[in-house]
Amino acid sequence: MKQYLNLCRRIVDEGHWIENERTGKRCLTVINADLTYDVANNAFPLVTTRKSFWKAAVAELIGYIRGYDNAEQFRAIGTKTWDANANLNQAWLDNKYRKGEDDMGRVYGVQGRQWAKPDGGHIDQLRKIVDDLTKGVDDRGEILNFYNPGEFHMGCLRPCMYSHHFSLLGDTLYLNSTQRSCDVPLGLNFNMVQVYAFLAIMAQITGKKAGVAYHKIVNAHIYEDQLELMRDVQLHREPLNAPKFIINPEIKTLEDLETWVTMDDFSVEGYESHPAIKYPFSV
């Protein structure tokens, strides 16, 4: 929480105003931020200076792992995070590649599980990573990459968190995640949970110990209509103790994650927070 709040203060104190073409709003922006999460000691980075809803973030991560491409699929596992981008983004509604209501196109998990090869067929990036790590192999390229410029026009949104690079040192698994753009008041709450949970889940299904997750954000920003709530409310609250993230020990394989796992297989212990803050969301 301290590193999260330090980033928020840095943006408020040092940020530059940038016009965002996609949303038509101004953002107070800084470049480059590095966060770390102690997964080994189960210090779950769930924001405590406002009430945070972690289940939707984990549900979204499971949807990416499964390669979902439809907002209805995400709703079925417990999150509505893709409803707006799939159905309210006018550029996507006018796109000839959109298949209909709730379609997201070739974004995020689709790229991770079905990266199109130019000579035909697909590459399952995540399957290769899981197989290697389970065998104790790290070829220094255990990278899950969602960023495919050749297919941006075939999806409703470019990925924000676009790369997850797993590394083995002995029997300990580490993760470096890179994010090109981050709505800090709203999105970062989700992103921190997902980076942490991804390392914890991958360590469990590959039989490794979880180490540290490193989270790099390139463009960190606060939208103009969020600034007052961040500056005058959230930054005046004292952070509370970190909770613990619990994963059902029966989740042992990638196939388990693909088939029977639900949000009931995850829980959080010891979470206390300040009251909720309703930040505006920009589509």
Image (cartoon, rainbow, N blue to C red):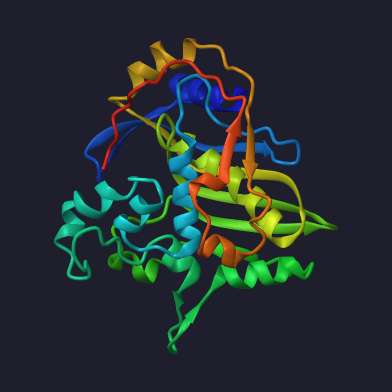
Image quadrant for the C terminus? Answer: top left
Q: Residue lying at the far bottom in this picture: please name it.
A: 119
| Residue drawn at the location 32% of the way across and 55% of the way down | 157
* Residue 261 left/right relative to 74: right
152 vs 159: above or below:
below
Work out whether 263 lies above or below 52. below
Q: Residue at x 74, y 67 (%)?
A: 134
Residue 169 % position (x, y) = 82, 56
- Residue at 46% x, 21% y is 50
Q: Nearer the viewer, residue 9 or 191?
A: 191
Q: Quadrant of residue 242?
A: top right
Nearest to the observer: residue 182 or residue 47: 47
Report the label total: 0
Task: Tell me where residue 46 appears, x and y as whole percent.
Answer: 55, 31
Give the image location of residue 147, x and y in percent: 45, 62
Front-lying residue, 29 or 142: 142
The quarter of the picture where the N terminus appears is: top right
Q: With 211 as the anchor, is 107 left or right in this view?
A: left
Between 150 and 72, the one nearer to me in the picture:
72
Q: Position of residue 269 (x, y in %)?
A: 62, 30
